[in-house]
Amino acid sequence: MDARTLEGSIVALVTPFNEDGSVNFDELGRLVDFQIANGTDGILTLGTTGESSTMTDEEDDAVCAFVVERVAGRVPVIAGSGSNSTATQLAKSLSYQRLGADALLIISPYYNKSNEEGIYRHLATVADAVEIPCILYNIPGRTGCSISVRNVERLAAHPNVMAIKEASGNIGYAADIAHTLGPDFKMFSGNDDMVVPLMSLGASGVISVWANVQPALVAEMCHAWLAGDVDRARQIQVAGLPLVRALFSEVNPIPVKEALAQMGMIGANYRLPLFPMADGTRAKLVEAMKGAGLVD
């Protein structure tokens, strides 16, 4: 499936675990079906929300293969292949391509960070080597380094780089890279509280944590904007903010997994260093979910 035409709502899917920490593929399959039945335009697996940082390479491959098979071509599947090691990011990217992913999410190097040219080559090395399109992931709050405007300009011109997931939370930065957008290079919001603002700058949608629990609504928001219904898109964005804030009241994906557990869809199981929510933030999350009509 051609991911280059993708727009709208892409869910950053959680990876459900059993109590013993193993991947719960039954729950994962139900989540995939729930997303597609509710109008999600694409599925990202093994992203930040998917907890791949605590999973083995074998588990990553198994999850990618399972999601690709379960989706069965109904929507594009993006696999998060990011690493702070260029060689590891390349190996993961080639593996997920072989397993049938339609696109890749590649990230700037965290911890070691690198300099300008190193960051460019870290990302371009994968784009040069694979045959499926790549989405850049700018999230300096987690990586400790941003993809500079100049590097976005350079990478946007690469024939195998289709988009950027912009998750800096910096509207000014998004505006600075907006001139790179066009038919061959898109932007997706990586922040659920800034989807409509970024779409006003030319973004094509969102890669969303929020969509895990309200996929139809997030898709409606994006498609309302794309169809020119600015008022409806703005209404959904503003009305959804209390729930979005609650979904990020502790580090992602702790609250969204708790929310899905409250909805009876998965168990609230994590791998250390992630840990179940504190009682106070859990109570506030449940109140926000009640306000959104997700639980009684």
Image: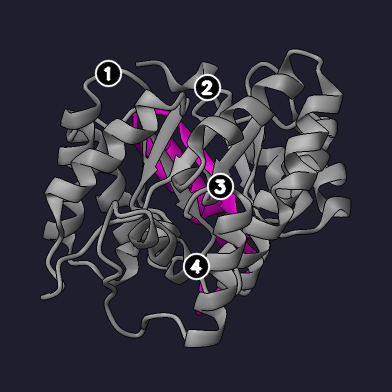
Residue lying farthest top? 227
First in residue order: circle 1 vs circle 4: 1
Disc 1 marks which residue? 73
Mark 3 or mark 4, which is nearer to you?
Answer: 3
197 over 227 or under it: above or below: below
Q: Nearer the viewer, residue 148 or 295?
A: 295
> Tag 3: Cα neighbours inside 10 Å, few (<14), some, or many (≥20)?
few
Kind of residue indicated by mark 1: Gly
Disc 2 marks which residue? 6
Kind of residue indicated by mark 3: Gly
Membership of 128 in magenta stretch? yes
Kind of residue indicated by mark 4: Asn
Contact? badges 3 and 1 (CB < 8 Å): no
Quarter of the image containing the N terminus? top left
What is the secondary structure assignment of the residue under circle 4?
A: loop
Membership of 291 in magenta stretch? no
Mark 1 or mark 4, which is nearer to you?
Answer: 4
Disc 4 marks which residue? 252
First in residue order: circle 3 vs circle 1: 1
What's the magenta region?
110-139
Kind of residue indicated by mark 2: Leu
